[in-house]
Amino acid sequence: MFYLGSFVGGLFFVYLLAALWEWVIFKRVFDDPLKGKMSSVGAAWLTGGFLAGWGMADGGPYYWPAFLLYFPSALVIAFFAYRKGHRLRESQPTNVDEIFS
C-alpha cells in the first residue's frame, strides 16, 4: 500500500514541479516545446527525488532509493508531456509566410 501512495503522491508532486520548472525556466530557454516539456519533467524528477531523500530519511542518512520511488510517476508524466509537446511542435508555423499571414 505504501508504493501505491508513493505513486499517486509522486504523480501529483512531479506534475506540479514539472509545471513550475517549465513556467520558470524551460519555456524561455528552449524554442522547441517538446524539449522544454521533457526537460521540465526530468528536472522535476530530480528535484522530487532530491527532496524526498531527506524527507524519507527520518533522522537517518540520506535515503537514495527515493529517486526510484518517483521514477514510475515521472515516466507517466513524461509520456503525457511528450504527447503534448509533440502536438505543440506540429502546430507551430514553419516558415515566415505562415507566421505573418
Image: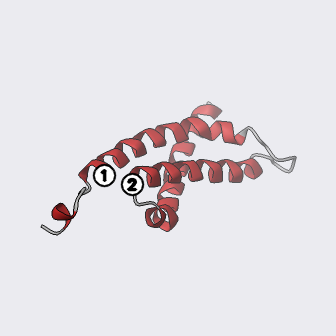
**Count of numbered marks:** 2
What residue is rendered at 48% in x and 48% in y?
38
- From mark 2 to mark 1, how far is it between C-alphas? 6 Å
Q: Residue furthest front?
A: 96
Question: Which mark is drawn over residue 33?
Answer: 2
Which quadrant of the figure has residue 71? top right
Q: Is residue 83 above or below residue 22?
A: above
Depth check, front residue: 42 or 55: 42
Q: Assign the C terminus to one quadrant of the image.
A: bottom left
Depth check, front residue: 32 or 84: 32
Q: Residue furthest left?
A: 101
Q: Assign the N terminus to one quadrant of the image.
A: top right
Q: Secondary structure under badge 1?
A: helix
- Residue 30: x %, y % from top left: 45, 60
Q: Earlier in the sequence, mark 2 or mark 1?
A: 2
- Residue 61: x %, y % from top left: 87, 46
Mark 1 neighbour class, 10 Å CA radius: few under 14, some 14 to 19, many 20 or more:
few
- Residue 2: x %, y % from top left: 64, 34
Q: Is residue 95 left or right of residue 73?
A: left
Q: Secondary structure under badge 2?
A: helix
Depth check, front residue: 10 or 81: 81
List the residue tagged with mark 1.
Answer: 88
What residue is rendered at 41% in x and 43% in y?
82
What residue is rendered at 46% in x and 55% in y?
36
Q: Amino acid at mark 1?
A: Leu
Q: Amino acid at mark 2?
A: Pro
What residue is rendered at 23% in x and 59% in y?
95
Q: Is residue 34 left or right of residue 74?
A: left
Marks 1 and 2: in contact by CB < 8 Å?
A: yes
